[in-house]
Image (tube, grey):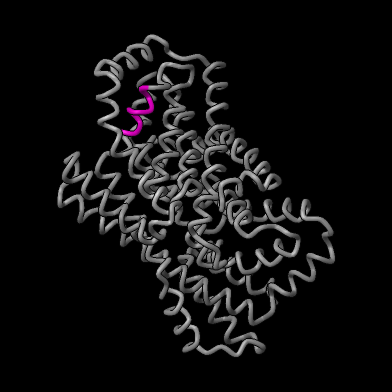
Amino acid sequence: MIGLIFGVFFAILLLGVPIGIAIGFTCVIISVFVPTVTVTLEYMFRNMVMALDSFVLLAVPLFILSGNLMAHGGISDRLYSFFAYFIGNVCGGMPMTAIVTCLFYGAISGSAPATVAAVGAMCIPILVNLGYDKKFVVGMVATAGGLGVIIPPSIPFVMYGLSSTESVGNLFIAGFVPGILIGAIMCIYTYVYCKRHGEDREKLETNFRNIRQHGFWTAFKRGSLALLCPVIILGGIYSGVFTPTEAADISVIYAIIVSMFIYKTMTWKDLVTASIATLKSAVPCFLITATATVFGRMLTLMNVPQQLAETVMSVFHSKVPLLLIINVFLLFVGMVMDTLAAILILTPILLPLVKAFGVNAIHFGVIMVVNLAIGFVTPPVGVNLYIGASIGQLSVIDVAKNAMPYIICFLVALLAITFIPWISNCIVS
């Protein structure tokens, strides 16, 4: 029966129905055609409302708004210039600067598509003008944007915490080292690529002199407030001064003060535009959250997690093959399903399985988010691919091909994260 239910769900998706509505339709079908689940439409609606009645969930639209405000405020440009001051003259330094900028911008926006849009729109033209191949640059930025959901604060971590009842603050902390690891491996590949294909050193030397001509203090003043944002957000969460939701509030206020009154790069009109863009992003998230929560409770009523756990434990006797299979499954899911929906639907099913084999819930949350982050650059969903292709005016196929080496970097890091729990747990209290 469960196979039939998911078959119907994917069939509805293939018809082009938005994922939140597709999940809702599937819930209705279960309530009507599965006699063991005595669920009324009133029950479904009540649980959808209850799913949205969450203090933690408030962090999602606030982090989206903060990211949009920072994008309008030109924060990514200041971050890029600051990091270029230090590594812009080494082999592959300017492309590596884009990766580091994605890391830090992810600590502001918590969103992969927002990171690609903000960093890509600024650095892709710069790198192309410096002589780097456009396809290479766009593929790199599209993949590096996935760091936006691993480096805290992360919207998928908020959703995983909501679904698993784990501490969102601990999940944020757990994502810090894995995010840096992935970024470091991507930088190593970038260095090798640039060493092999060569660079226009004359252009790079001229560009580096222009960056350094005003001195360190000027570069620091331009970038310090942008750098301070993730320090305030993450430092406050880690020290226990405020919760992740309160941190999201503070990030919005900070973004408005810095962009409008200090940098003066954002107008009241931009504030309205950013708010409208936030609504367009947040409303689908809330619909997915509401319907996916009901869907998960229906699966629980059907004893799906228990049945699946019994089947899996009769087949697997070690966590190594189980985690490998789950990784492959999540990679496939990331290719065809929205990240937030995947987390909300699959966490109640997969988490009991891995817990039975001694896998820590925080560690598994990192594994799940890293897997689904790869889905941002794999067709057919691959949102980052479409954003990168639009910015670079390339075909999605070209971007996907050139993103492949960086996807391999992600996969190498994923294997390390999966089988070395210390990477996720080393700074978690």
Instruction: Using residue 323 as the reference point, say whether residue 45 is left or right of it.
Output: left
Residue 13's place in the image compared with 88, above or below, is: below
**Mostly what secondary structure, the magenta segment?**
helix
Instruction: Using residue 247 as the reference point, say whether residue 327 is left or right of it.
Output: right
Instruction: Using residue 277 as the reference point, say whether residue 56 is left or right of it.
Output: right
In reply to whether residue 420 is colored magenta, the answer given is no
Q: In what quadrant of the picture does the N terminus appear?
A: bottom right
Q: Residue at x 28, y 26 (%)?
A: 219
Residue 199's place in the image compared with 68, above or below, is: above
Asked if residue 324 shows in the view, the reply is yes
Locate residue 377, reporting x and y percent.
52, 44
Asked if residue 14 shows in the view, the reply is no
Q: Residue at x 32, y 52 (%)?
A: 251
Q: How many marks?
A: 0
Q: Residue at x 45, y 83 (%)?
A: 45
Q: Quadrant of residue 223?
A: top left
Locate residue 123, reporting x and y percent.
36, 31
Q: Quadrant of residue 12?
A: bottom right
270 or 379: nearer the viewer: 270
Locate residue 279, reporting x and y percent.
31, 62
Locate residue 227, reporting x and y percent.
34, 38
Q: Which residues are magenta?
A: 78-85
Residue lying farthest top? 202
Residue 396's place in the image compared with 210, above or below, is: below
Q: Residue at x 42, y 49 (%)?
A: 234
209 or 424: nearer the viewer: 424
